[in-house]
Image (tube, coloured by chain):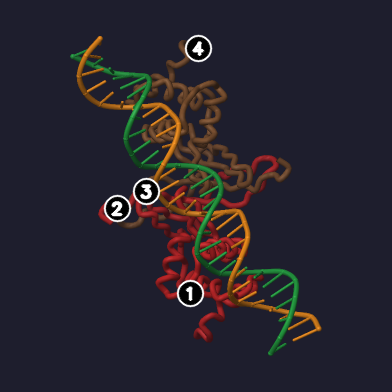
Chain colours: A red, B brown, C green, D orange
Amino acid sequence: MKEERPFAQTLTRLRDAGLRPTRQRLALGRLLFDSGDRHVTAEALHEEAQKAGVSVSLATVYNTLHQFTDAHLLREVVVDSSRTYFDTNVSDHHHFFVENSGHLMDIDGGKIAVMGLPEAPEGTSLARVDVIVRLAGDPRN
Amino acid sequence: MKEERPFAQTLTRLRDAGLRPTRQRLALGRLLFDSGDRHVTAEALHEEAQKAGVSVSLATVYNTLHQFTDAHLLREVVVDSSRTYFDTNVSDHHHFFVENSGHLMDIDGGKIAVMGLPEAPEGTSLARVDVIVRLAGDPRN
DNA sequence: TTTGAAGTTTGTAATGGTTCCAAAAAGTCA
DNA sequence: TGACTTTTTGGAACCATTACAAACTTCAAA
């Protein structure tokens, strides 16, 4: 159960998604998937890549995040109209959102149940139910 | 139980909120509150005002929407990162969001119950729980 | 291995919703 | 009315995101 080769895991994910394993996608994939569940913005990931010594343009970060999202390797979380978050956790779950710090935390989907949901109106079908628990942050932070 | 004077209702709301009843605020207030629950974007309300023959700048529409929100006459709904919706329904409720048309519908808060919510983490307090039911829209629309 | 077509990346320009700003206009109250 | 405060306004500025066309990679067939 040890990591054989550094890129092996991400490489497989990319192949399965039909995405060419380019240097940039591999590097971003590693940053995103090699360390548990994460919530990132494009800007933040870009900065992180720079710091890790990986040269990727911001445009590519955006492209990649969207391609990963289309391939269901990521999920977009809409909580704040000023920026878009991408979540590496694509399983059934919800979020805590700390309003003033912009910090996101997962809430396991198994823990929460939404009762009494109305039917999807005529001509539409249910795509997803998002529960966002908005928190007033501690001003001391 | 009839409407006495056209602006009376909005005027009272403004006074109660400590907002001066200017021509612009009265006009926007009427558009917003005189016809049931509504979900508007700044651009849409601006256009609507123009069509109704009310001259208001877009900047004022933004200012007013925010002031109304601060005064709890409106509530902001975050469902789509590309635009901000304002909701004239400030009571406890949730939303249907039709993903491709951008259409929002209220779901009465009494109908839905969220079970199993975790406690707010140390140093934060619960501000609000938003349930967003995302719908795949009918492509025929 | 070479080659060429298709897919990717990149810097930069463009977009679009929203906010900022300082001057002009309107509301308030004695 | 006059003096003062709050609002409104048009236009510039902002900023996250997207668009674009040129340069660069990838990949598989020859």
Q: Badge 3, how many Cα within 10 Å: few under 14, some, many 20+? A: some
Query: Quick one: D13 or B68, which is closer to the camera?
Result: D13
- Labels 4 and 2 positioned on one and the same chain: no
Label 4 is placed on what type of residue? Lys
CA gap, disc 1 and disc 2: 30 Å
Q: Is residue A91 visible?
A: no
CA gap, disc 4 and disc 1: 65 Å
Label 1 is placed on what type of residue? Asp
- Labels 4 and 3 positioned on one and the same chain: yes
Q: Badge 4, how many Cα within 10 Å: few under 14, some, many 20+? A: few
Label 2 is placed on what type of residue? Asp
Q: Is residue D21 above or below residue A11?
A: above
Q: Secondary structure at mark 2?
A: loop
Q: Chain of mark 4?
A: B
**Label 3, on which residue?**
B126
Looking at the rendered image, the disc whose residue lies closer to the viewer, 3 or 1, is 1
Looking at the rendered image, the disc whose residue lies closer to the viewer, 2 or 3, is 2
Q: Secondary structure at mark 3?
A: strand
Q: Residue at x 65, y 40 (%)?
A: A121
- Labels 3 and 1 positioned on one and the same chain: no
Q: Secondary structure at mark 4?
A: loop
Q: Residue at x 46, y 10 (%)?
A: B4
Looking at the rendered image, the disc whose residue lies closer to the viewer, 4 or 1, is 1
Q: Residue at x 60, y 63 (%)?
A: A67
**Label 2, on which residue?**
A138
Q: Secondary structure at mark 1?
A: loop
**Label 4, on which residue?**
B2
Quadrant, the C terminus of chain A: bottom left
**Label 1, on which residue?**
A34
